[in-house]
Image (tube, helix red, strand yellow):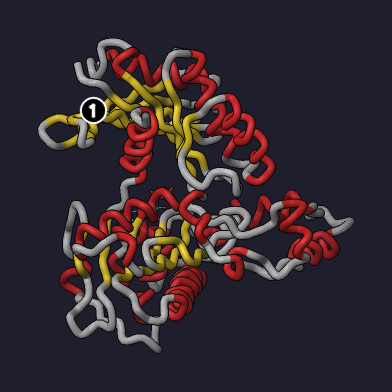
Amino acid sequence: MSDKILVINAGSSSIKFQLFNILSSKPEFQILAKGLVERIGIKDSRVSIELIQNNSFIKYDKQIDVQDHAFGAKLIIEQLQLYSVISNFDEIVGIGHRLVHGGEKFKTSTIINQAAENAIIKSVSLAPLHNPAALKGYNAFKALNPKIKHVAVFDTSFHMTLPEEKYLYSTPYQWYQKYQVRKYGFHGISYRYILEKLAAILKKDEKKINAVVCHLGNGASICAIKDGQSFNTTMGLTPLDGLIMGTRSGVVDPSIHQYICEITKNTSDAQTIASVTDILNKESGLLGISGVSSDIRDVTAAKEDENHPKHHLASLAIKMFCQRIANYIIQYSNDLDNKVDALVFTAGIGENGVLIRKWVLEEIKILSLKLNSKANEEKYDDYVLISDLSSVFPIYKIRTNEEIIICHDTYELLNKK
Ligand code: ADP
């Protein structure tokens, strides 16, 4: 049996996993299984596992009471053994964990030793929604098998190259010095994958690539990559900033908090700073504007159906969503002196949203970007060039793969002499 690497993405009520075989010392990795434990600590929790067979995945899933992450981790290992993906735990030589926030401390991925664990715990105040969940995942697997090495791969690390004028807010400089208030940026693991992919597609040295990458999933951001490094990005201190997302507002006037708290004071709808932040994270964005759904497929369907009761609001939500993306694409092209090797659409909406890509590009008026509608609609596994030759720069849809980057970093750090 060859050595394997387990990649873990633990959320507050879920643990996603992928298991990779290490094929050679080059290294090359082959996915063996992936799955999810969901609704941890909530009614109707379940575990699912998808096994690769004849180049496609076969899914098995079952309902089971999962009280906490510790049991979730145990369940994952049991499922891998039950379906004979591993015969024993020791075949897993390393576990790579996705961590949303590494603060300024983690400019690269790291082996999780006591010092790293302490620093991650310290960064919890910067990512109170995300980092504690990842730590729960780490502790759960550590308890199951204390011998295994763990690696943390951060969404923020890629953006540690942002120049000062991009990462600073126009707030008192002391806030940065005393409280680390700055733009961190997220989705860096996905941007790294796209950058590697672009280097292969364009046959160009990664360090020379300039690109505008739109990672449009439930959470969405854009990154300007200059000479192979993050130069600007839309998310900020937290993932709430920037684009309009499924349920997140993206950028708003920071006075909204105080105004809402004041105006609702002494009413049945009284709000606090914490509740407004919660609404901006969970009840805003596409869902908040349209009142239809946080899933852009539902919002698009309501926009396309003139008889839908929320047709107008759904159309408005999509228009606002696309316009904001378009404006950042223009701004970031300017950041890159208009020398853009590629504009990329990736993640759930970016990869699959045929109409969204079209509508985003229609909102861009000062750059001559030309979509090839046949290529835009084409089915694909990996990537497709979706622009015409006459386009001012090439446009691609590329399927991202964050897990392979985590697997790669885990392997590299485990084998570092
Ligand atoms: P995250 O990882 O942030 O949860 P994903 O990258 O998986 O998000 O993207 C999820 C989103 O992708 C869904 O909410 C949905 O809006 C969108 N999506 C999935 N399939 C399609 C499709 N065929 N067309 C448009 N959007 C899609």
Quarter of the picture containing the N terminus is: top left
Q: Nearer the viewer, residue 43 or 390?
A: 390
Q: Nearer the viewer, residue 329 or 166?
A: 166
Q: Secondary structure at mark 1?
A: strand
Q: Nearer the viewer, residue 33 or 249?
A: 33
Residue 186 in sight from this viewpoint: yes
In the picture of the structure, the residue carrying the numbered disc 1 is: 21
Q: Quadrant of residue 64?
A: top left
Q: In the image, residue 93 lies at what x, y percent?
A: 34, 21
Measuring 76% from the left and 68% from the top, which residue is drawn there? Answer: 255
Q: In the image, residue 317 lies at what x, y percent?
A: 50, 69
Q: In the image, residue 25 lies at what x, y percent?
A: 21, 31
Q: Nearer the viewer, residue 82 or 355?
A: 82
Measuring 30% from the left and 10% from the top, which residue is drawn there? Answer: 88
Mark 1: amino acid: Asn
Measuring 67% from the left and 66% from the top, which residue is drawn there? Answer: 169
Q: Residues within 10 Å of mark 1 (few under 14, many from 20)?
A: many
Q: In the image, residue 380 lies at what x, y percent?
A: 18, 56
Q: Quadrant of residue 153?
A: top left
Measuring 46% from the left and 58% from the top, which residue is drawn there? Answer: 220
